[in-house]
Amino acid sequence: MSYIADTLDNLVHQTAFFSLSWGNYLMIAIACLFLYLAIAKEFEPLLLLPIAFGMLLVNIYPDIIAPPGADGSAGGLLYYFYVLDEWAIMPSLIFMGVGAMTDFGPLIANPKSFWLGAAAQFGIFAAYFGAIALGFNDKAAAAISIIGGADGPTSIFLAGKLGQTNLLGPIAVAAYSYMSLVPIIQPPIMKALTSEKERKIRMAQLRPVSKLEKILFPIIVTIVVCMILPTTAPLVGMLMLGNLFGESGVVRQLKETASNALMYIVVILLGTSVGATTSAEAFLNVSTLKIVALGLIAFAFGTAAGTLFGKLMCFLTHGKVNPLIGSAGVSAVPMAARVSQKVGAEADPQNFLLMHAMGPNVAGVIGTAVVAGTFMAIFGVF
């Protein structure tokens, strides 16, 4: 009987109930909320669902992301996924997949879109100075500020490159959360800064873009951007390589792999490993609250800056540019462009802004990568 009692006692004490803190239970509740948003509300489910599940796992079983022991024992499963984030492998592969799925035609047809994509990066610099004011060091502030570009992979990439891995979890979760909440956060800002008359502006149809232009674009952008900022090569290079797979027309299998199978595999590994960085001990602190607040401010500033620059272009072109497309300058592709279309259609159901908004949207992806490369150059990181 004693043996049976001891065995049962050991089994009971091996359960998670005896080791979890109140913080773990709170994070489990937050993970369940994220799962609800991903499944029931379909808020960016491809990203939010694996992140939420990784959050759930690490707060039940923290050792799932534990590093290898000094005695040579193996680390936890998600630790090895996380190392690929730190090495910038996952973000770069995500960019390849995004490039394979992206049509740069609207940007090529209307190069002025680059200005709108650049204007939306203002949120990054607003968050940078805000983070400095809140007591973060310069590298931490730079890593946090990229949230303003609504670009999860770039946020992870820069945090790893600048050695801010202790902040990677909160930064990544904030970035991906705001990406998924684009349809909720952006419209009130867009409507507040534009009149109904401006929202009803119909833009002229974009000119056709030749196949040669689409092939040359990724090659030229890679040469120009990477020559000026070589540190952007992992992101910009992979983005343009993925796009060239599709536009060249000669490697259909590579395009399909990059935009489907490989992309989904990387999303699973990246999402679960990012979620696993949100243990209660690492996530429930004042710094995390500051990061979440700064991310929201940065994203709001980026949306506002893009919209206001759109208003300026509207004025300079005598009403030929709908200011709503400026809000798509943040990097959430293609959701931000869809929001521009949705808000425009609310004012005029026959107004089709999606293709016009895709120009600033993809310009924002390039712009955020350039800003990340600029920070790396400033801090001498390669």
Image: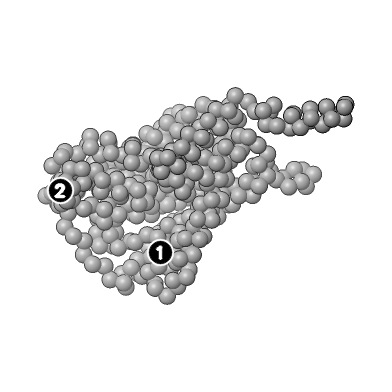
Question: Residue farthest to the bottom?
Answer: 250
Q: Mark 2 points at which residue?
A: 201
| Observer able to see residue 261 | yes
Residue toward you, 346 or 309: 346
Residue at (32, 52) in percent of width and height: 361
As measured in the structure, the alpha-carbon distance from the residue carrying label 2 to the one carrying label 1 is: 31 Å
Disc 2 element: loop
Q: Which amino acid does label 2 sit on?
A: Ile
Question: Residue farthest to the front?
Answer: 1
Determine which quarter of the picture holds residue 227. bottom left
In the image, residue 285 lies at what x, y percent?
A: 54, 27
Q: Name the residue under label 1.
A: 243
In the image, residue 329 lies at what x, y percent?
A: 32, 48
Residue at (49, 44) in percent of width and height: 49
In the image, residue 278 lies at what x, y percent?
A: 56, 36
Residue toward you, 199 or 167: 199
Color theme of the render: one colour
Question: Residue farthest to the left?
Answer: 318
Residue at (87, 27) in percent of width and height: 1
Disc 1 element: helix
In the image, residue 358 lies at what x, y percent?
A: 30, 54
Q: What residue type is labelled 1?
A: Asn
Badge 1 crowding class, 10 Å Cα cut-off, few under 14, some 14 to 19, many 20 or more, is many
Contact (Cβ within 8 Å) of mark 2 with mark 1: no
| Observer able to see residue 139 | no
Determine which quarter of the picture holds residue 188. top left
